[in-house]
């Protein structure tokens, strides 16, 4: 019986197969791996640029399909999409996530990841206002928020 074609996107570099590991994929997508303080926690802009340039063709289409109305954090960090700004100051004590990314000159930029309204404009509305997300994707985003969609599959989980 013939074997089903592999669903994973492999890269062949210098005769070796390279597969996107889950820590790097989560860091590109969410800004941090879901198991914090692992090796893939990027702290410098060059780390984000390297990973994003290498894996954008894998992560971005899956993000649009499985997380409509959102974009990977790496796009914001790398400057492809302008960073969302806070509307009002945050309370001193809060549990919202952020990452501090150091640029080449040593300056640190803070990227907030999960700050809700009214402190920050929702990501889908922000992207729609910028013209990155169309009305159809905005509709899909609402369905995704209701739980009507599949979860984002990490690339390593597709590997047979």
Image (cartoon, rainbow, N blue to C red):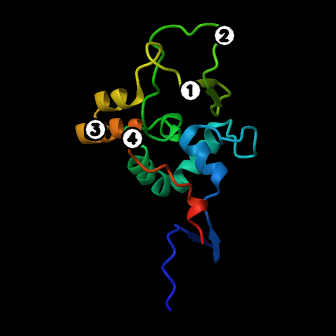
Residue holding disc 3:
139
Query: Which label lies toward us, 2 or 1?
Result: 2
Q: Residue at x 60, y 24 (%)?
A: 109
Residue identified by numbered label 4? 144
Q: Are marks 2 and 1 in contact (CB under 8 Å)?
A: no
- Dot 3 or dot 1: first in sequence order is 1
Among all residues in the image, which is located at the extreme bottom? 1
Horizontal side of 53 relative to 102 (left or right) equals left
Circle 1 residue:
111
Callout 1: 10 Å neighbours few (<14), some, many (20+)?
some
The picture places residue 100, in percent across and down from the top left corner, at 64, 27
Residue at 59%, 37% (x, y): give it: 31
Give the percent coordinates (x, y) of residue 74. Answer: 53, 40
Q: CA distance from mark 2 to mark 1?
A: 17 Å
Q: Assign a secondary structure to mark 4.
A: helix
Measured in 3D between alpha carbons, the distance from the residue under mark 4 to the one under mark 1, in whole angstroms, is 24 Å
4 vs 1, front mark: 4
On screen, 98 above or below 4?
Answer: above
Pair 3/1: label in front: 3
């Amino acid at each position: 019986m013939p074997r089903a074609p592999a669903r994973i996107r492999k890269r062949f570099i210098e005769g070796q197969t390279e597969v996107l590991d889950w820590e790097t994929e989560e860091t590109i997508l969410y800004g941090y791996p879901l198991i914090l303080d692992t090796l893939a926690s990027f702290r410098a802009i060059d780390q984000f640029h390297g990973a994003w340039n290498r894996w954008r063709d894998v992560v971005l289409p899956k993000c649009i399909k499985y997380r409509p109305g959102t974009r990977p954090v790496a796009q914001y960090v790398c400057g492809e999409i302008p960073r969302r700004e806070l509307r009002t100051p945050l309370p001193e004590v809060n549990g919202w996530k952020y990452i501090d990314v150091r640029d080449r000159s040593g300056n640190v930029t803070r990227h907030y990841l999960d700050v809700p309204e009214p402190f920050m404009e929702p990501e889908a509305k922000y992207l729609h206002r910028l013209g990155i997300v169309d009305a159809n994707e905005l509709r899909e985003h609402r369905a995704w928020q209701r739980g009507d969609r599949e979860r984002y599959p990490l690339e390593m989980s597709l590997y047979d």
